[in-house]
Image (cartoon, rainbow, N blue to C red):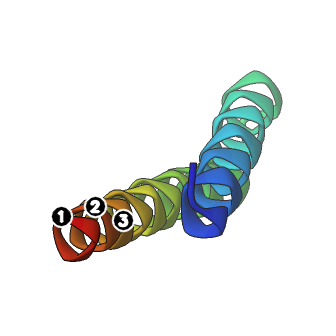
Amino acid sequence: MHRDEMKGAAKDAKGEIKEAAGKLTGDERLEAEGQTDQAAGKVQKGVGNLKDAARDVLKH
């Protein structure tokens, strides 16, 4: 697993927590921040996946 995948997963999880907290408290800004963090985390995980795939191709 690439470092970007781990960081992305952490950012995604943090976003889920923020979104849930925002929903519970009625804080729309916190909820939106959570959604943004989740999207950024998913992108970062995707970048990590691409790097892993590229590394595998270069090895063979």
- Measured as percent of width and height from the top left, residue 30 is found at 72, 55
Secondary structure under tag 2 reads: helix
List the single residue furthest toward the top: 24
Whichever of callouts 1 and 3 sits on the residue coming sooner in the sequence is: 3
Element on which disc 3 rests: helix
User: How would you rate the neighbour count of disc 3 (Cα within 10 Å): few for under 14, some for 14-19, many for 20 or more?
Assistant: some
Q: Position of residue 31 (x, y in %)?
A: 62, 47
Tell me what residue is drawn at x 33 percent, y 71 percent: 55
What kind of residue is marked 2?
A: Asp
| Left or right: where 14 falls relative to 58 | right
- Residue 26 image-quadrant placement: top right
Residue at 82%, 32% in the rendered image:
25
Please tell me the numbered disc located at residue 2. none
Residue depth check, mark 1 versus mark 3: number of the one nearer the observer: 1
Residue underneath mark 2: 56
Identify the residue at image location x=57%, y=48%.
1
Q: Is residue 59 above or below residue 5?
A: below
Please give the count of numbered marks on the rendered protein: 3
Q: Nearer the viewer, residue 40 or 45?
A: 45
| Pair 2/3: label in front | 2
Task: For the residues labelled 2 and 1, say whether their Cβ atoms are less than 8 Å apart.
Answer: yes
* On-image quarter of the C terminus: bottom left
Query: Which of the 4 image quadrants contains residue 19?
Result: top right
Q: Distance of mark 1 from mark 3, alpha carbons?
A: 26 Å
| Residue 46 image point, x, y percent | 32, 59
Amino acid type, label 3: Val
Read off the residue under disc 1.
Answer: 60
Which residue is label 3 attached to? Answer: 43
Residue 15, given in percent of the width and then of the height, sits at: 66, 48
Instruction: Tell me which residue sits at (66%, 29%) in the image.
Output: 23
Disc 2: CA contacts within 10 A as few (<14), some (14-19) or many (>=20):
few
